[in-house]
Amino acid sequence: IKEVLKFLPDKVYIQLYYFAQFKHFCNLKNPKTYNEKLNWLKLNDRNPEYTKMVDKYAVKKYVSNIIGEEYIIPTIGIWDNFDDINFDLLPNQFVLKCTHDSEGIVIVKDKSNFNKEDAREKINKALKSNFYYIGREWPYKNIKPRIIAEKYMEDKECGELRDYKFFCFNGQPKAMFIASDRGIGDTKFDYFDLNFKHLDIIQHYPNSKQKIDRPKEFDKMIELSRILSKKLIHVRVDFYEVNGQVYFGELTFYHFSGFQPFIPEKWDEIFGKWLELPD
């Protein structure tokens, strides 16, 4: 349905989507909450640099120039078309990702059990779609759709690849959340402050019932998120921790595309106060 509504101007589309989620329109004239401000930024903060910062291939060079190559997950190959990939040359374990969206991802833990036809269908479908039209996140509009293969990563201690995502405002991280159990299709989100105190936030996914330990390199992630968000009004900086080593994940300008309510609602206002819009 979102593809069908391509013809709608961004502002109209945003208001309709926002109303569907929140049961009231988005206050774009005088935004107060975090979600309102994210949508204001989509319409008003259009720095062309953002496009390379959300391109999953181009961002690697951008980030490695700032914090160093050692934090970048190695790229095995890059292609324009699925049928250009020579799978015989790939290792037994790898990850395929589309560079222009968040849906086109295939995790291969054992190449001998790899269903190439399913992967082709998933990747080709993703290559044909423009992620911009889903939430009107304009930095995605002009990314060239490509496929990258990355080294497969897994943390031995937790047996998965957990995401550590830091909300940064004018270069200052203020809160973060950990995404766990994604690999088994039972995603959990747990929010913390920068002292690793659990926050009473539920957003889209439930909290984990398991105790989540403070990552070993938590302070390092805070430091790196501060560096990477230095000149930006707002960005979410995502990391992984693999066997004690920090790796960069991605930069996200619009958390949940600015369309996801907080439970309790007060957190939409708290995050909103942290996000200071330019005049």
Image (cartoon, rainbow, N blue to C red):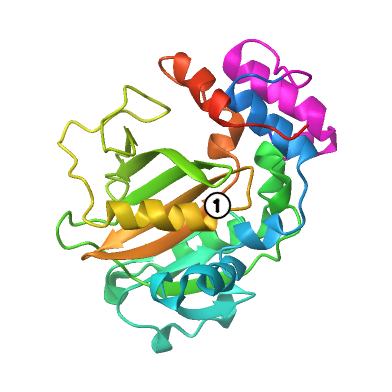
Whether residue 38 is visible: yes
Nearest to the observer: residue 119 or residue 218: 218
Q: Position of residue 205 (x, y in %)?
A: 37, 30
User: Magenta stretch: residue 27 in it?
Assistant: yes
Whether residue 102 is visible: no
Position of 257 relative to 244 (above/below): above
Q: Give left or right: position of 246 versus 255.
A: left
Q: Position of residue 3 (x, y in %)?
A: 72, 40
Q: Which residues are magenta?
A: 3-30
Position of 70 relative to 169 (above/below): below
The quarter of the displayed image where residue 19 is located: top right
Instruction: Write down the residue under mark 1.
Output: 229
Q: Give left or right: position of 144 versus 44.
A: left
Q: Position of residue 18 (x, y in %)?
A: 65, 22
At 21% from the left edge and 46% from the top edge, which residue is drawn?
A: 214
Instruction: Give the farthest residue toward the bottom.
Output: 89
Nearest to the observer: residue 146 or residue 41: 41
Nearest to the observer: residue 8 or residue 27: 27
Magenta residues: mostly which secondary structure?
helix
At 69% from the left edge and 31% from the top edge, which residue is drawn?
A: 39
Amino acid type assigned to the residue bearing label 1 in the image: Ser
User: Magenta stretch: residue 29 in it?
Assistant: yes
Quadrant where the C terminus sits is top right
